[in-house]
Image (tube, helix red, strand yellow):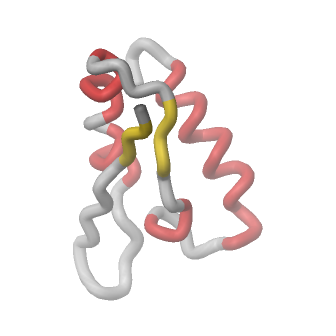
Amino acid sequence: MIGGTRAVFPDDRSCADLDQALECIPEQLAAGFTSFCIKPSQFTDDPKGVGAFCRDVMRRVESPAG
């Protein structure tokens, strides 16, 4: 099963909060989801930072503390 995150934007110019979006991942993991779709452009405006963003997401979801 494929899960995902829901981005919540504080205004029409800001990126969404990654911490808030990732709060749903543990529940989805417990329900059996094994793959997740996350759109980096919802959380960063820096195209050069997408690699670091992806590594950060993986670190957070692999960590038991989140």
Q: Residue 46, how many percent across, how many down?
A: 65, 72
Query: Where 66 sits versus 21, above or below?
Result: above
- State the residue at coordinates (48%, 26%): 34
Q: Residue 49, how many percent across, how many down?
A: 70, 61
Q: Is residue 25 left or right of residue 52?
A: left
Query: Where 16 sits versus 31, above or below?
Result: below
Q: Is residue 39 left or right of residue 1?
A: right
Q: Quadrant of the N terminus?
A: top left
- State the residue at coordinates (32%, 48%): 21
Q: Residue 50, how many percent across, how many down?
A: 68, 59
- State the residue at coordinates (67%, 40%): 55
Q: Is residue 63 left or right of residue 21?
A: right
- State the residue at coordinates (58%, 29%): 59
Q: Quadrant of residue 7?
A: bottom left
- Please identify the residue farthest to the bottom as the structure is shown: 12
Q: Which residue occupies the foreground of this view, 7 or 44?
A: 7
Q: Which residue occupies the foreground of this view, 31 or 60?
A: 31
Q: Is residue 50 left or right of residue 4?
A: right
Q: Quadrant of the C terminus?
A: top left
Query: Where 30 sits versus 46, above or below?
Result: above
